[in-house]
Structure formats: C-alpha cells, structure tokens
Amino acid sequence: MQTLLINIKELLQVREQHIDKVSGADMKVLPSIKNAYLRIENDRILDFGRMEDLNGKTVDSVLDIKGKMVLPTWCDSHTHLVYAGNREQEFIDRINGRSYEEIAERGGGILNSAKKLQQTSEDELYEQSSRRLEEVMALGTGAIEIKSGYGLTTEAELKMLRVIKRLAEDYPITIKPTFLGAHAVPSEYKQNPEVFIDLLIHEMLPKIAEEGLAEFIDVFCEKGYFTTTQTDRILETGSRYGLQAKIHVNQFSISGGIQVAIKHRALSVDHLEVLDTNDILALKKSETMPVALPSCSYFLGIPYTPARKILDAGLPLALASDYNPGSTPSGNMNFVISTACIKMKLTPEEAINAATINGAYAMYLSKTHGSITRGKKANLIITKEIPSYGFLPYAFGSNNIHTVILNGKS
Ligand code: NIG
Ligand code: FE
C-alpha cells in the first residue's frame, strides 16, 4: 500500500541522515523542504522531496494537502497516563493556599492516587486510561512513555503495567513502559522505607522482569521521597534486570541525584526545575537527555526548567508532558511546546526539535521515530492551513492539527 502526500506547504524536521538527537546551538535549526511531497509505503516513510522532482510512479492513493504542513508526531517521553480517578479536590486546595508538598505530607498526592488505583479493577483502569490515550493521539502524539507508580503494592503495580501492555497491543501509538515503584513510600512503610525498597527489589522487580512488563526503571529522587543512596540501589538492581534508568530529579531540590543517574547511564533525567553548575557539568560528560516538563511548572506554579542555561551549555533538551493526575492533568504536547516557547524562551525550532527527535531519544526510539527520514515510521501530523510553523506555538490553546497519521494510517 502506497500513499502520496502532495503540495505540502512545508515538510518539517527532515533528516536525510540518521541522527540520534540534537544538542545546543544545533537545536536552533529545523531542516525543512518547502512545497514538498512525501511517499508512504505501509507503515514507513518511503521517500520525500521537492514537488518539482516528483516522478510519476503509481500509488494507491494521493492526498493533496495544499496549504498544510507536515511534521513527525510528538514523542512524549514522560507520562503517568495510566491512573484512576482524578485529584480535582487537591487542585482546589492549592487554589485556597495549600502547597503541593503540604498536600502530599497530609496523605494526599501520590498516595491518594495509589489508594484510588488499588480499588479500581484492571478493566476499569484500562477504560479510563484508553480515553486519555485516544485524546493525546488526536493531539498529535505518536510515541509515548507511560510509567507505573500509582500502585505501590506488587499487585497494583503489576495491574498498571498490564494495562500499559494492553494499551500498547490495542492502539497504533508506540508505547514504552516504565516501572516507577519508587514513586512514593506508602504510609505503612514511612518508618521503615528500606522494607518497602526490599519489596520493590525482591518481589516487584523479579515479577515485572519475568512478564517482560517494563523497559525502563524510574525513581522519584527528592526530599521526602527517595534519597540518592536509595535511588542508587534501585537503579543498580533495575539494571541487573535489564531496565535502563530514567529518573525524576531536581524538581524541588538539588540532591546529587543527577550524578547518580549518570553513573547508571540513565537515558534521561526529568524535571530539573532547579539545576546548578555541577549538574550541568555532569550532564556534559554524559549521554543522558535532560527532559523539561513545562506543563507541570505551569500547573503547580513552580519554576520552569532553565532551558536556556541547558542549551547554552551545548546540551540537548527534550520536552515531555508529564501527564498525571496531581501535577499535570494534561497530555497536550501542543501546549507543552507553546509553554516552552513562552515561558522557557525556546525558539519554535528548539521546541519542535525537543518534542520530536530528542523526545524519541529519551525513549530509545531515535532509530524509528522523531524525524522525517526514509525508513522511519510514517507517524505524521498534518497541520491545518497555517502561515508558518512558528504559528503552532504562537497560537497557544488553538488546535492547529488537521490529521494525525500513525503507522501510515489516519
Ligand atoms: O512527575 N514528581 C513526581 N511525580 C509526578 C507527579 C505525581 C503526582 O502528584 O501524582 C510528576 O510530577
Ligand atoms: Fe512525572
């Protein structure tokens, strides 16, 4: 099956040669072809070029998309999309002056979501999560990482990971599963967190590995959650089970967690709302992707990740949604890109690079996703008629997506 898109106003993020990621000043460049065609064969990108170079080979269908642009779908490398219920009450509590930390200390926060999830059946959890997944797919996300971490018992963590697996089997979007058992210490282990970590290491991890339910391992390394020493131990064990590290770190405080993650060759370090020179220097000596989550900063009213400091140091940066019930009840990557431009001072080129190829890197998907490259997945956004690609972040809150193509099909 071959499909040909013709009269593309501008084909964005065209990479003739394979790249893994873009860093520093290179992120200011978003290669493109104006007045382009793109050929899809089954679920792959077969060919592309300028309209004047298009030859007359026969195809099964032709789509004339005059005035519209085409770019790779968003690669959202950090979400907690599988959860039960919502935390609307905590949202109201915060409006009335309680802080996110205060709510968590009183048994709200992650533990509140865990209680709800433990009481929800696997089928109901699948139902609730599939609606959110369908929503983000329609908003242009074509690859997504989803974490466990609202279970916090062996049974409930397995339930979450099985739901993630079922979603991956049932939907055309690419899904990468992460085990985040170390998301919060349940109240019954507050006096003995090491006992919970033992459970995670000796009971949860072996079962997850046996069923092949996760590819990455995550830890919330933060004051009141998991220390650097505990993070080190959990990541070490995860790597023995073949799970690569991706951690939550530097959201509220600087702890040395970035250095621990790098020691374990983490694929990404995520949040980084606070970041010092030592952190930047450590990242410069690594292949680890810094990931910013601007919708979380927006929703909680906390500082934004200092993106300019990161890029000016020559580092790469990825953008992700952090979709979750507590700190970011939105998986809209278009909003993430707008907010990155408006609040973190990224240019549209930097933001689009961060949300496509660099997001793919943070999920170990650069070989197949994140750019318009021959042989990569035909996961494409066709925009509405827009004057330029900068219009995407500029027109924040508007939906400028006309069609989403996943695996070559709309
Ligand atoms: O990435 N920071 C840790 N975990 C999530 C939010 C957890 C929650 O509040 O439910 C995050 O923001
Ligand atoms: Fe998160």
Image (cartoon, grey):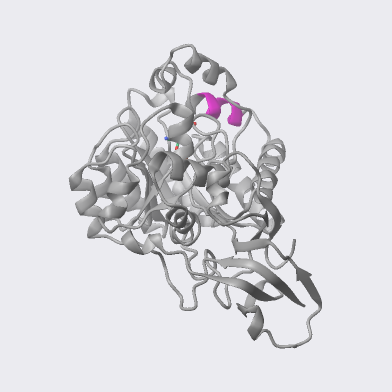
> 299 or 209, which is in the foreground?
299
| 114 is within the stretch colored magenta | yes
> 47 or 198, which is in the foreground?
47
Q: As drawn, is 264 to the left or to the right of 371?
A: left
Q: Position of residue 257 (x, y in %)?
A: 27, 43
Q: As drawn, is 230 to the left or to the right of 14?
A: left
Residue at 35%, 31% (x, y): give it. 225
Main SS category, magenta section: helix
Q: How many marks?
A: 0
Residue at 75%, 61% (x, y): give it. 410
Residue at 31%, 38% (x, y): give it. 250
| 10 is within the stretch colored magenta | no
Q: Position of residue 106 (x, y in %)?
A: 43, 15
Q: Is residue 321 visible?
A: no
Q: Which residues are magenta?
A: 112-118
> 203 or 193, which is in the foreground?
193
> 169 or 143, which is in the foreground?
143
Q: Position of residue 167 (x, y in %)?
A: 66, 51
Q: Does 21 sit above or below residue 51?
A: above
Q: Position of residue 248 (x, y in %)?
A: 38, 42
